[in-house]
Amino acid sequence: MSNPVLELRNVTAGYTSRSLGIFGRKTTRRVLDGIDLTIKQGGIFGLVGGSGSGKTTLARAVLGFIEYGGEIFIDGRERSSGSRRDFARAVQSVFQDPASSMDPTKRVGFLLEEPLVIHRLGTKAERLRRVDEVLDFIGFDPAYKKRGISELSGGQRQRVAIGIALMLEPKLIVADEPVSSLDVSVAAQILNVLRDLRERLGLSLLFISHNLELVHYLCDEVAVLAEGKLAADG
């Protein structure tokens, strides 16, 4: 039996602050409290919760952006056993505002190819073939390589963000509120892209949202995060 793509065991996380600046008393607020979660290969797991429930903190822990307690296994390997770069080919992310992570002066082809260049993967010809392949995955024709990010709509930018996440052929994508800034019809198109990627690539997804209706539409399993604890959605 293959390993789960993602497994969290008793994961905790919190933030430390001082009430009166650098001379104030240090306090720690626990945001995640004993989280256990498993995503199987090809599974879409929906995590729903209100503002401040800890959804984004959990995403940041999985991606290695913050320190955490407990254990996080990605494709059978404990995350703390390597750097964020070590795990980049196994887990990638898509966030709410794709424009914030894209250089508006660059073209779509450049942005898609960049992860391969950074990781020194493939020849130039091989990288360009991969760009064309990923453009097809996200519903674009090859001509989009020459389009500037500033020319695209919000939904098209989010497709490019998904494409960038796909370039390294990850096993898991963490999608944190990826459609919350889009109107309903465009959001539905993006959800269908994600569902299609699961069918075509066997991709697994941790889909985080405050919208229970969207989560039920897309996901195989759903859990609610409240006050740092996880509960199955009934």
Image (cartoon, grey):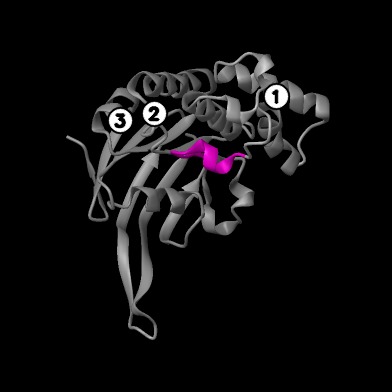
Query: Residue 138 location, x and y as percent?
Result: 55, 20
* Alpha carbons under labels 2 and 1: distance apart: 28 Å
Query: Residue 126 location, x and y as percent?
Result: 78, 25
Q: Nearer the viewer, residue 124 or 22?
A: 22
Circle 1: element type: helix
Residue tagged 3: 215
Which one is earlier in the sequence, the residue at label 3 or at label 2?
2
Which one is earlier in the sequence, the residue at label 3 or at label 1?
1
Query: What residue do we see at 49% from left, 36% from top?
Result: 173
Residue tagged 1: 130
Q: Nearer the viewer, residue 21 or 199?
A: 21
Q: Is residue 220 magenta?
A: no
Query: Are circles 3 and 2 on residues that touch, CB within 8 Å?
Result: no
- Residue 27 appears left or right of 104: left
Does residue 40 appear in the picture of this structure?
no
Circle 2: element type: loop
Query: Are circles 2 and 1 on residues that touch, CB within 8 Å?
Result: no
The residue stretch that appears in magenta: 93-102
Query: Residue 73 location, x and y as percent?
Result: 48, 49
Query: Which dot marks residue 182?
Result: 2
